[in-house]
Image (tube, coloured by chain):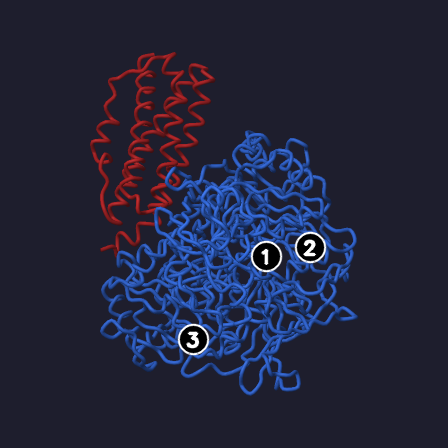
Amino acid sequence: MPHLTTYIGLADRSEQTLASSLRAVAEGHAHIADVFHTCRTLAEWSDANHEALAPVVERYGEAHDVDEPERLQAAGLAETRGGEIGLLRDLQDLHVLATLVQTTWTVIAQGAQGLRDRELLSITEQANNQTSRQLTWLNTRMKAAAPQALIVAP
Amino acid sequence: MSDRVADIYGVRTPHARGTVWPARVDQYLDPGVTEDAVDRWVQSACLLCSNGCGMDIAVHDGRMVGARGRPGDTVNHGRLGPKGLYGSTRWAHAPDRLTVPLVREGGRLVETDWETAMARIVTTSRALLEEKGPLSHGFYTSGQLFLEEYYTLALIGKAGLGTPHMDGNTRLCTATSAAAFKESFGADGQPGSYTDIEHCDAVFLYGHNMPETQTVLWTRILDRTRGAEPPRVVCVDPRRTLVALEAERTGGVHLAPRVGTNMALMNGLTRELFAHDWVDHEWVAAHTVGVDELRDVVAPYTPEHVADVCGVDPSDLRAAARIFGESQAVLSTVLQGFYQSHQATAASVAVHNLHLLRGMLGRPGAGVLQMNGQPTAQNNRECGADGDLPGFRNWDNPRHVQQLADAWDVDVMTIPHWAPPTHAMQIFSYAETGSIGLLWISATNPAVSMPESARIRRVLGGDQCFVIVQDLFLTETAELADVVLPAAGWGEKTGCFTNVNRTVHLSERAVDPPGDARSDLDIFLMYADAMGFTNRSGQPLIGWRTPEEAFEAWASVTEGRPVDYTGLSYDKLRGPSGIPWPVNAEHPDGTDRLYADGVFPTDTDYCETFGHDLLTGGAVTEQEHRAKNPAGRAFLKGAPYTPAHEQPSEQYPLLYTTGRTVYQFHTRTKTGRSRDLNAAAPDAWVEISVADAEARDIVEGDWVRVESPRGRIEVRARVGNVMEGAVFAPFHYGHWEPDEAQGGGHSDTGRRLANELTMTVWDPVSKQPTFKTAACQVIRLRDGDGPAPAPTTTASAPVTEPPPGRRPRPTAGGGPTISTVLESTPTYRLDPSQDGEGSCRT
């Protein structure tokens, strides 16, 4: 199952990338209390998804020839931007990363169905659910921040 | 003659379960004023807590000189508390009232006239609109204006300017109450009634020190607990308050969870209901959605696990859950111990969950009272000066927004509804960067009441934002303003306000305001006129001049909404009692309790919100809400416990929590100007447990420094009733002091502000700031020369016998009041004890 392992590897590392990016945004915007605390909470969810995947990685192995998450990370979230518009852009980057995570889980869930792998299916359902909540918050927060950032921010 | 500083609750009138609460009329007149000398009594209601007691104002020679409870009022049956008696009128003729506008010139505030002050506001406002548009404007109001004023300001902000940046200090006191209602029931609106007290067989107070926050309501409870068939009391509070003592006396339970662990406790109680099958399955199936998810969320919270997290005895948790599970009619009340803690909305929603699981709503005795912190907070929520849309409309529902656009005759695009309204903490962040360039503050004192005071002073005092303050006095906030407008206060203007259990009162003008002070309504109208706001027909946007006209306009936009005022008028409110909404053709006399039929305003097209993720605040979409098909069923929503944002550390090993005392209200603007009240609690203090005091060699009255990562205070210590590891500080005391004759003149005025230590952090759903959880350290500074200046009559009483020279005298010294128990109790139209037909079937 060479391609399932590719996707398991993608999920594994993109959750780690999302977690570290969320933490980078938390630290970079630490003066914005809700961003600071919520991003750290959401990072813990990605950690948990990553950890839940460990037994599956052990069973199926993990392909290491996946470079998308690294490329996304290189696109910006090791460092955060300043100001209200910078926050908006950082949240948008997180949303892109989380979308990659979510579609990866969706693809793996399909594989798990085909393999009748109940353990993997249950992991993907839980992870997909948590990723949806991450995306919901990011979307809510961007909507709240956007008007001021786009129109008035210094 | 009774000293109501010493005897806070007055004489008992105990009575049996299911019988009407007797009437007792309390009255206070200023020294030297006899009853004969009172020229007239003017109808009003008390503005010094959220209880909303019906009150008449005594007027003599053009001055307000005292207060008397209204015996026929459904809220208080004639009673008044110490703040209402001693604090209602004294401030009005204080020598330091603002009587003329002030403007900043060369760094100083100088006196001017209205034309000059308003011209300066309008010039700045127009320039900002031209340069940056309406998002450059922010409004921060209060829980103490009248509904006519909130509604007028809401219209100015939402339809005149079109800014989403409107909020009130209600964000600090009552936002979680509204948010919790919306999450569980689909819309704001208090389900229960004070009359539930007469019918319950158990009463749970969650983070609610009612004996100090709503003394008359506590009197109502005491008259049950001291009568036949008393209810058992369960107290959830880290301090051993008078509620805790009553819990012990009635065979109830005092649960003292560690500061910041409410959610774990609530999950434990909820799990017990499931574990013992104290669940009304039929009712739950018919009237709720989400029970399976809730059961899963609370499953890990065994009593032993909860005991570990919260530091409570597992058997106490079991006992409390059993009382909830086996009582026939439970009344729950909730206040700041939940609202101002972390996970505020989730914990308050959990209280609803308990009631929903047992089907305990909508009948006498079985109710929830999510309390408010302030007398008119409810109106800010209803009228939309806090950012919500007027009439509990859903900003995410285009049809609701269109209704307002039609009513106001404005383009729907003008009304800011594209995102959630901006909450107070965010407004101040925008003001901090200058993104908001004009901030208009009315009837509130954020320099003292908001968290992390040093930051708030910086925001208000900087050049990046033009600050307007409209108030009775030159408060700590007004001192930092660019323009200060002198406002008329309660008794000097007419208007309505609505209390915790939806009861609307009319408060008539009793006297003229001093000097050039004007009502908040007139000030807002003056601004609207000067700005020339018009509707699409080219008519003035605000089509009213008087409070009564504003009320009628407000009532008309509530039609068809849960908060229905259409059956109310000033004439109707001039009767013996306030009237609880909804008041309409179907309920012409008002409504004692909501949801008698178990039908909730959750329908997707009707609800006030589609709801949120309780952990993150992420918004549920319309499609997701529709897919759940709530259709009048309430939501059971759970959340896991998460640790508080700031945990104790080696440097800051204690947990800091702030709160209030019975004798002061907010930042003491009124109560500090009543000698009777101020002398009872004249200066700040901090309460520390016996063990933590001994570990630091602190004895009663010693000066201590309390530090957090954000700031420090230096005040005197009371070795008191807080649990070990916790520190309690009253938040009332800024640097303002009355003169020495009023009990002022302390040496620590610049070093006692409790909010120097609190954090800038808020609940993800209600956006209420977290005042009750921060880490701190307490360090002994030096000997005191007497006891701490804390009252002895309340939760602040010393817990052990202090050493000689440090023993406080029992708190006393209120002027004489009269209290008359009526032989025959008036008829209260909706009271179920008198067979009132008060319940609402939607």
- Residue B208 visible, this angle: yes
Q: Position of residue B40 (x, y in %)?
A: 62, 84
**Which image quadrant for residue B500?**
bottom right
The residue labelled by disc 1 is: B794
**Which image quadrant for residue B542?**
bottom left
Quadrant for the C terminus of chain B in the image:
bottom right
The residue labelled by disc 3 is: B487
The residue labelled by disc 2 is: B196
- The disc labelled 2 sits on which kind of residue? Asp
Name the residue at 38% across, 77% down.
Answer: B526
Q: Nearer the viewer, residue A6 or B474?
A: B474
Q: Is residue B197 left or right of residue B213?
A: right
Respond whether the residues carrying marks 3 and 1 are from the same subunit.
yes
Spatial CA distance of label 3 from label 1 is 34 Å
Count residues near mark 2 (Cα–Cα under 10 Å), then give few for <14, some for 14-19, many for 20+: many
Spatial CA distance of label 3 from label 2 is 38 Å
Instruction: Say if B51 sits above or below B642 in the image.
Output: below
Q: Which chain is blue?
A: B
Of the chain colours in the picture, the one used for chain A is red
Name, please, the residue furthest toward the front: B804
Q: Nearer the viewer, residue B626 or B576?
A: B576
Q: Nearer the viewer, residue B675 or B209?
A: B675
Q: Position of residue B810 (x, y in %)?
A: 60, 61
Q: Is residue B703 left or right of residue B28?
A: left
- Residue B409 visible, this angle: no
